[in-house]
Amino acid sequence: MEAIVQAKVATTEFAAHRDDLELVRAQEISNDEEKELAAQGLRLVKQWLSEVEEKRTAITGPLNKALREVNELFRPMKRSLEEAERDLKSRIAGYLAESEAKNLRAIQAAAAAETPAQANEALATVARAELPRGISQRFIWVFEIVDASQIPREYLTPDMVKIGEAVRARDGKPDIPGIVVRKESVISSRRA
């Protein structure tokens, strides 16, 4: 509750700068003097941003620390319960799959039976595996890549990290077909 009060005080303090911020943002830059004024405004904005971040982390730091400690306390219990959940789900799915396979074998045996009595005997072993109350089953399609060289191009994604590294390593002149490189300006500033 105290953190909320501190945050409200900080936002009220920042509201005093709102008009100044709008003036800085509206600053035209068409000559050197205006460029210098904009640079002063940028340094001021950087200072306000730093002050806001300091106040925010002063409030959230202790909250984040408490959250980490609570998560650490619960992590072993949660991990153990999640493992048990995965294990039980896997075993139920395995049982259901085995029941289905057993039924399929019985149906195949009935189809291959030489007499109606043998077919009936085989079909008598077919049983529907009922799901326990509160348990549901659905099916999903899963895949694994067995030969990446066979995957059609439309399913491939460029490695943006690798491309970025090549662009920087070759000073903006990589030898990569299909890539256009342009130079962008990045302005940085220190606090006022």
Image (tube, rainbow, N blue to C red):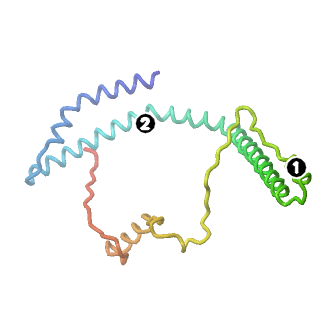
Q: Is residue 50 above or below residue 166?
A: above
Residue at image location 68% in from the left, 38% down from the top: 136
Amino acid under label 1?
A: Asn
Callout 1 secondary element: helix
Q: Residue 40's spot in the image, x, y percent?
A: 18, 46
Q: Residue 58's spot in the image, x, y percent?
A: 43, 33
Q: Residue 184's spot in the image, x, y percent?
A: 26, 62
In this rendering, would 104 be left or right of 173? Answer: right
Callout 2 secondary element: helix
Q: Which mark is residue 74?
A: none
In this rendering, would 59 be left or right of 10? Answer: right
Amino acid under label 2?
A: Thr
Residue at image location 37% in from the left, 75% down from the top: 176
Q: Is residue 151 above or below residue 24?
A: below
Q: Residue 143's spot in the image, x, y percent?
A: 61, 60
Residue identified by numbered label 1? 120
Instruction: Count neighbours of disc 2 (C-alpha within 10 A) and say few if under 14, some if 14 to 19, many if 20 or more.
Output: few
Residues 22 and 115: in front is 115
- Tell me if label 1 and label 2 are in contact, CB under 8 Å: no
In this rendering, would 28 be left or right of 119? Answer: left
Residue identified by numbered label 2? 57
